[in-house]
Amino acid sequence: MYFLIGILCGLVIYNFIIIDLPFPLALYKKLLHEPVGLIDMKDMSPVLAKSMQNILDYEEADFEEVFGLHFEIVREVFGEKKIYELIPDGSKVPVTWKNKKQFVDLYVDYTLNKSVDLHFEAFYKGFHKVCGGRVLELFHSYELMAVVVGNEDYDWEELEKNATYKEGYTKDNPTIVLFWQVFRELPLEEKKKFLLFLTGSDRIPIQGMKAIKVSRFVCFISYYLM
């Protein structure tokens, strides 16, 4: 399943299609072999990330009494408590003021890497089967993410300027002029709904509105005005 999802994500990029894949930035960093860390956990689990930061920031002498931690992660899996040791015999090693950074680093590494290694490896293989190669080295992770999910840098004037028409319609046709007059007065949410209807996504390509090419624009307009 993860292999197929990786292929899907690769096809999206290969064909310049925008799709709502709500993956965190950490996934794209891992695809490009960029390091991931505590900052990436904030997108996935703000509460957990804040807890880890609180551990790092605490400077009082009663650290062990306040946190009561050991080098282990306790999770519930299908109603059963599972313990994953971060170091050998980690359940017996307390987290102290001196080794707290090591604990946080290991915790983050387990969460973002080791615990999902099998799933990510399958996703990675599927993705690179379609979209591998040196071209990916040209991207930063946030750019690769923008290619997949688009952005919200709307330029509605650019959309109007680049619209093309068929069946004898032109930009000066009364129907077209009326449509754009109405469209300009729509609130943002309504404009985004039209964009979703027009292209299948309410976000725009990384290249901007000029990349949206619709050869049957008048058909969409006629439907939208009905």
Image (tube, rainbow, N blue to C red):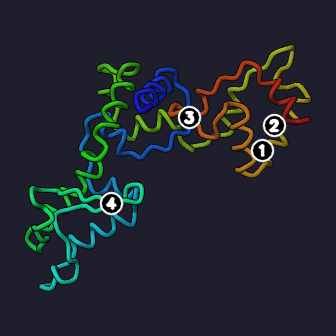
Q: Measure how far apart labels 2 and 4 are at the Cα level.
A: 55 Å
Task: Where is residue 171? Give x, y as percent.
Answer: 81, 25
Which one is earlier in the sequence, the residue at label 4 or at label 3? 3
Give the mark toward the camera: 1 or 3. Answer: 3
Whole-Å distance between the Cαs marked 1 and 3? Answer: 26 Å
Left or right, residue 26 beside residue 159: left
Q: Work out whether mark 2 precedes mark 4 in sequence or the reverse, and give the earlier one.
A: 4
Instruction: Specify the label residue 184 is tagged with.
Output: 1
Circle 1/circle 3 CB separation < 8 Å: no
Q: In this view, does 180 lie above or below 71?
A: above
Q: How far apart are marks 3 and 2 (CA)?
A: 26 Å
Across and down, in percent, residue 15 comes to: 51, 21
State which quadrant residue 60 falls in: bottom left
Q: Do the residues labelled 3 and 2 touch (CB within 8 Å)?
A: no
Residue at numbered disc 3: 19
Please, what is the three-letter code of the amino acid marked with disc 3? Ile
Identify which amino acid the numbered label 4 is placed on: Arg
The residue lying at 68 percent from left, 26 percent from top is 162
In this figure, which residue is indicated by the disc labeled 2? 180
- Rendered image: mark on residue 75: 4
Neighbour tally class for label 4: few under 14, some 14-19, many 20 plus, Cα within 10 Å: few
Instruction: Say if 12 sits above or below 47 in the image.
Output: above
How far separated are the C-alphas under marks 2 and 1?
Answer: 6 Å
Q: Do the residues labelled 2 and 4 touch (CB within 8 Å)?
A: no
Question: The residue tagged with tag 4: helix, strand or loop?
Answer: strand
Contact between marks 2 and 1 (CB within 8 A): the answer is yes
Q: Which mark sits nearer the N-terminus, 1 or 4?
A: 4
- Left or right: 155 with respect to 89? right
- Three-letter amino acid code at the position of disc 2: Trp
How many numbered callouts? Answer: 4
